[in-house]
Amino acid sequence: MRLDAFPVVDERTIVCVQAGNVNSGAFDPILEICARAHSYGAWVHVDGAFGMWAAAAPGRSHLARGVEDADSWATDAHKWLNVPYDSGLVFSRDADALRKAMSVGGAYLAQDEDRVPYQYTPDFSRRARGIEVWAALRQLGRSGLADLIERTCRYAGQFAEGLRAQATGC
């Protein structure tokens, strides 16, 4: 996203920034976009399918600068943690907005003031996907997660260099 081309928006707008585009790896200028969008009252969401994990790696965390200023974030645990495909994570600064977006209702569904799990997930019936995510993070720890990210980025860079060398005949 180009900050110089950012349009005038309002409080009815959701601005979706990318943290690590799936195809290119590119990061939008999140810090600056959050400041601009919030000055208009807009909501900022970070699509961090890959890139949110960069925040866990000291050598790459600068790429995710500004994500803490967003209103909501989503990432895919299956992309780097090697957990089941349907292990997406969503975080929101506004718990009520998350509940409203993810909840379903019906007269036959008993509800009370306690946290009702189906009000916080798009799937009404699902298995406990969080267990695999927790187990992977627990096993890796902070340093293991940082190493995993740094190592795979290093391998991707080596792969890109190999392709570039082959394309140029070097």
Image (tube, rainbow, N blue to C red):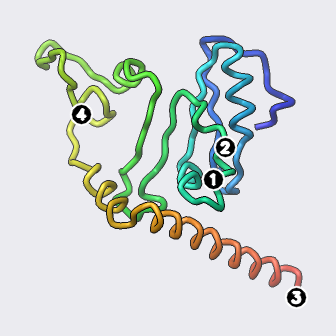
Q: Residue 124 at what x, y percent from top left?
A: 24, 34
Q: Residues within 10 Å of mark 3 (few under 14, many from 20)?
A: few
Foreground tag (2 vs 3): 2
Identify the mark nearer the N-term, 4 or 2: 2
Which residue is label 4 attached to? 124
Residue found 37% across the figure and 18% down from its top: 96
Q: Residues within 10 Å of mark 2 (few under 14, many from 20)?
A: some
Q: Tell me the element at label 3.
A: loop
Which residue is label 3 attached to? 170
* CA–CA distance in space, label 3 to label 1: 33 Å
Of residues 168 and 14, the one nearer the viewer is 14
Assign the C terminus to one quadrant of the image: bottom right
Which residue is label 2 attached to? 65
Q: Tell me the element at label 1.
A: helix
Q: Are marks 3 and 1 in contact (CB under 8 Å)?
A: no
Q: Is residue 39 left or right of residue 149?
A: right
The label shown at residue 61 is 1
Foreground tag (4 vs 2): 2
Image height of 126 relative to 101, above or below: below
Looking at the rendered structure, the kind of residue marked 1 is Ser
Looking at the rendered structure, the kind of residue marked 3 is Cys
Q: Residue 81 at what x, y percent from top left?
A: 42, 62
Q: Is residue 29 left or right of residue 45?
A: right
Residue found 62% across the figure and 11% down from its top: 11
Identify the mark nearer the N-term, 2 or 3: 2
Identify the mark nearer the N-term, 3 or 1: 1
Of residues 91 and 5, the one nearer the viewer is 91
